[in-house]
Image (tube, rainbow, N blue to C red):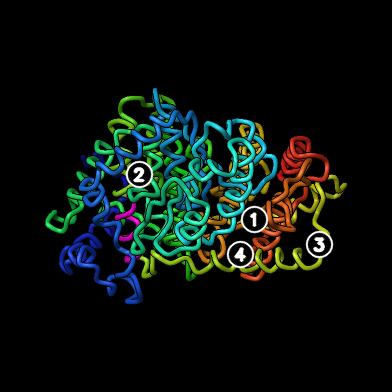
């Protein structure tokens, strides 16, 4: 079950061993399972540890999940569209990307964007009359899933009529939330409840992950069984040095204190999307109080020479479908002295085990770093800034005037040169793109990040807005002040109305981008906004050329 090894430089190996000995002597794993808040900051951590026992609880109620799957299949739904954000959407996305479509069950799609082009693209993919809509929000008050629900509820109503539309929707939320009230008023097919003692990013094995898993036809009992096996491997009765979650957490925490805080995730192609879930878990849990881990996901692998001395590489290798080039690249990193953790994943169902391993490890890393890994104090700041702007739009019908740097600006390369010239060893560059997330756009952004990485030998991150606001956004604002940010916004070729609101999806996205930039600047972060005023695809190509010119 473990399948975890490490290759660390001698000085770091010595520190890790010493910390493991301290954990053993102080009985810290036992204290974690006993929900002892003093293991962290002594605040409210004990209230957020429901994920420790959720796999076992879910196995005990497996018939309920099977009934969900049977009912959906009987109804003849061909697709299921999940409307969520952050912890409510990332686990279902991993499952969709890892397992694909399963015969005789609906294809699961996940929408977590306010970009009008992206919403239209998903609308074209689904037939509202044959689609099950899953509205997923722990708090029930998150802006994005709520307005997406309003949009698709109206589309489904037009397709099947007012009497039948509620039967096309289910909700997953915490008890007593606003979403529960909406679901009951609109006569949703069913409402599933999360546990208030489990935060969003730790909720993969709760109903937020397992109801969509059942809908798509996953063998949920098998999946949860793997999670249970990992939970047993991480039990307090297991010696710390043989506890996979504790060892990984100690490595993450100790190396971060030694400047190796850029956790570079390498995953076999068939399980590549695990990185998107891990990004949120690591960044939102640990990036606060000027400390934390900066996860680096889907950065193209390069030769050892392009990396600085601030990396920890974690290689999630799928034993049943390894990638030879990844194997060679990781071996080269080890030979060059870079710290590497290898995790062997036997098959795709081991994702259940990985969810638990990494949740446990993240809680341990938070203890090593001395922070509360269960709060997200800086995420709310962006939400408040966004809310202020959308409220103003509701009153005045417009957003405040602004003057961002335009991609058509003749001095763009010089502006970028000055911005990127602030990069120093140990920093990282994050590209925050408020545009449609698709393969063509990602290819352009990947080319930009690779050019920056190779020139400055720094870690690079790419996030699509607004989804990263509920993920890495916490670390960008609350973690180490070592980030250099490039925000990208665009004009929307065609906007979409939000039913019942004066603002549109395009206005919401613009407000989210502005709120994000505002908080970054308020926190003393180095942030530059580039607006694509020439169309998204052409604008990205122009930006790429300007970046290449700026860095010589």
Q: Earlier in the sequence, mark 1 or mark 4?
A: 4
Q: Which of the pair 103/11 is nearer the observer?
A: 103
Q: Earlier in the sequence, mark 2 or mark 3?
A: 2
Pointer 1 local density, CA inside 10 Å: few below 14, some 14–19, many at least 20: many
Q: Nearer the viewer, mark 1 or mark 2?
A: 2
Q: Earlier in the sequence, mark 4 or mark 3?
A: 4
Name the spot of residue 301 as percent of width and height, x first: 50, 35
Name the spot of residue 314 as percent of width and height, x first: 38, 43
Q: Is residue 372 above or below residue 496?
A: below
Q: Is residue 486 found left or right of 346 in the rendered image?
A: right
Give me the disc on residue 210: 2
Q: Is residue 549 above or below residue 255?
A: above
Residue at the bottom extreme? 42
Residue at the right extreme? 410
Which residue position is annotated with label 3? Answer: 397
Give me the disc on residue 485: 1
Q: Is residue 198 magenta?
A: no
Range shown magenta? 358-368
Give me the disc on residue 382: 4
Name the spot of residue 542 as percent of width and height, x first: 78, 39
Give SS at disc 3.
loop
Q: Which of the pair 45/463 is nearer the observer?
A: 45
Name the spot of residue 208 as percent of width and height, x first: 40, 49
Residue at the front extreme? 163
Q: Nearer the viewer, mark 1 or mark 4?
A: 4
Query: Which quadrant of the structure image shows residue 395?
Result: bottom right
Q: Nearer the viewer, mark 4 or mark 2?
A: 2
* Mark 1 and mark 2: Cα distance apart in space: 35 Å
Decide if residue 88 is in sight here: yes
């Amino acid at each position: 079950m473990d399948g975890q090894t490490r290759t660390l430089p001698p000085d770091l190996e010595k520190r890790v061993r010493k910390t493991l000995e301290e954990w053993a002597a102080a009985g810290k794993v036992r204290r974690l399972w006993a929900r002892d808040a003093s293991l962290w900051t002594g605040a409210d951590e004990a209230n957020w540890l429901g994920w420790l026992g959720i796999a076992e609880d879910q196995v005990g109620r497996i018939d309920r999940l099977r009934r969900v799957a049977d009912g959906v299949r009987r109804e003849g739904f061909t697709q299921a569209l999940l409307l969520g954000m952050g912890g409510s959407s990332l686990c279902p996305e991993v499952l969709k990307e890892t397992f694909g479509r399963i015969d005789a069950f609906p294809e699961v799609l996940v929408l977590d964007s306010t970009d009008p082009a992206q919403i239209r693209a998903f609308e074209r993919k689904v037939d509202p009359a044959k689609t099950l809509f899953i509205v997923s929000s722990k708090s029930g008050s998150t802006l994005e899933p709520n307005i997406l629900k309003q949009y698709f509820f109206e589309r489904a109503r037009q397709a099947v009529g007012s009497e039948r539309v509620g039967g096309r929707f289910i909700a997953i939320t915490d008890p007593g939330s606003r979403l529960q009230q909406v679901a009951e008023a609109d006569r949703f097919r069913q409402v599933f409840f999360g546990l208030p003692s489990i935060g969003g990013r730790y909720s993969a094995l709760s109903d937020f992950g397992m109801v969509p898993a059942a809908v798509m036809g996953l063998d949920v009992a098998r999946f949860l069984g793997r999670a249970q096996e990992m939970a047993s491997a991480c039990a307090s009765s297991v010696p710390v040095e043989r506890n996979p979650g504790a060892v990984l957490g100690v490595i993450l925490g100790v190396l971060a204190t030694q400047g190796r805080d850029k956790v570079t995730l390498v995953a076999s192609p068939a399980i590549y999307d695990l990185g998107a879930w891990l990004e949120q878990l690591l960044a939102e849990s640990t990036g606060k109080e000027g400390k934390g881990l900066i996860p680096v996901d889907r950065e193209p692998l390069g030769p050892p020479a392009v990396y600085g001395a601030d990396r920890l590489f974690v290689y999630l290798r799928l034993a049943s479908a390894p990638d030879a080039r990844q194997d060679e690249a990781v071996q080269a990193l080890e030979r060059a002295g870079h710290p590497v953790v290898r995790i062997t994943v036997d098959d795709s169902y081991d994702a259940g085990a990985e969810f638990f391993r990494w949740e446990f490890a993240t809680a341990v890393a938070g203890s090593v770093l001395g922070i509360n890994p269960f709060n997200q104090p800086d995420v709310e700041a962006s939400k408040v800034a966004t809310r202020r702007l959308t409220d103003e739009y509701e009153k005045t019908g417009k957003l405040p005037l602004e003057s961002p740097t335009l991609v058509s600006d003749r001095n763009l390369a010089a502006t970028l040169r000055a911005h990127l010239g602030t990069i120093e060893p140990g920093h990282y560059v994050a590209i925050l793109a408020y545009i449609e997330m698709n393969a063509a756009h990602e290819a352009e952004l990947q080319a930009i990040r690779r050019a920056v990485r190779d020139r400055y030998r720094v870690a690079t991150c790419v996030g699509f807005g607004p989804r990263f606001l509920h993920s890495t956004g916490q670390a960008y604002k609350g973690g180490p002040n070592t980030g250099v940010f490039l925000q990208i916004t665009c004009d929307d070729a065609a906007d979409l109305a939000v039913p019942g609101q004066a603002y549109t999806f395009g206005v919401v996205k613009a407000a989210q981008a502005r709120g994000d930039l505002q908080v970054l600047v308020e926190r003393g972060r180095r942030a530059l906004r580039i607006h694509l005023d020439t169309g998204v695809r052409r604008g990205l190509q122009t930006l790429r050329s300007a970046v290449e010119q700026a860095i010589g």
